[in-house]
Amino acid sequence: MKIFPAIDLMDGACVRLHQGAFSEKTIYADDPVAMARRFQAQGAEWLHVVDLDGAREARPMQTEILESLAKDTKLEIQVGGGIHRAEHIRHLLDAGVSRVVVGSRAVLAPEEVSGWLDQFGSERIACAFDVHLVDGTPIPSTRGWQDRGTRSLWDILAGYRGAGLRHVLCTDIDRDGTLQGPNLELYRDLLKREPELSLLASGGVSSLEDLAALKALPVDGAIVGKALYEEKFTLSEALSC
């Protein structure tokens, strides 16, 4: 299982939100490149970056920082936030990003995103589904988690069968930034329904035990943010889990 340390960017700083609320942010560092180098020194191979300003503005807003992260570290950079057009994907890939995460469009325009998967390749694009549970059913939200959807995650994923979708990032919004543990039941259900997908779990990781539980499901990757910044464990410990 790959560990993806996370950097969420807002106004050029590394922040974490609580349950996706832009008004509830904590600033952890003002130098994202220095933070990325710290993760690299501890053994990270991948870095997950969310452009929070881009998520709100529906276009990438932190390209210069992303270029620096790609150029000044040896990390594979996975980035999402504000990806709404094919030109956004091309621009980020040209900037040195390894994989682009498509969120809102993956929910709202699956036919368009299926075309992007064909155009850029299944390894260069991940689809992110950030969900609230409604009577036990995961319902993806869009536009930086600000707009709640109506279709279930299961219906949306069924529409991608045969489209080349490989990498899926799934976040339980109600667990994000809470350190309450990941939603293992959600991920277990997703893997049972869509076993061909490479699942990246996000939201709620608080301990090495959480990572061990995710690995046992098994998921292919876990995004870890607040637990690292709050020093619940080190990245080196997580990578050895």
Image: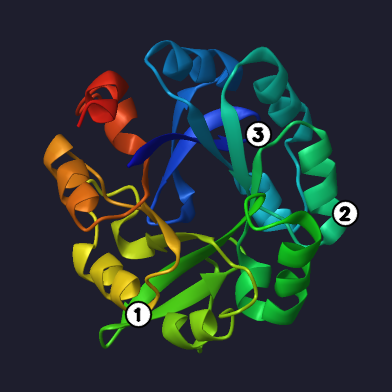
Query: Looking at the picture, which amino acid does disc 1 mark?
Result: Arg
Check the image and name the residue furthest to the right: 87
Residue receiving disc 3:
11
Q: Gap between marks 3 and 2, in whole Å?
A: 23 Å
Query: Looking at the picture, which amino acid does disc 2 mark?
Result: Glu
Q: Gap between marks 3 and 1, in whole Å?
A: 39 Å
- Examine the rendering and report whether any part of residue 81 can be seen: yes
| Residue 75, above or below 147 | above
Residue receiving disc 2:
87
Residue 124 appears left or right of 64: left
What secondary structure is marked by label 3?
Answer: loop
What secondary structure is marked by label 2?
Answer: helix
Residue receiving disc 1:
193
Q: Residue at x 27, y 34 (%)?
A: 227
Mark 3: few, some, or many residues within 10 Å (few <14, many ≥20)?
A: few
Residue 17 appears left or right of 118: left
Residue 129 in the image, given as x and y percentages of width and height: 49, 67
Q: Residue at x 68, y 70 (%)?
A: 105
Residue 56 appears left or right of 189: right
What secondary structure is marked by label 1?
Answer: helix
Mark 3 or 1, closer to the camera: 1
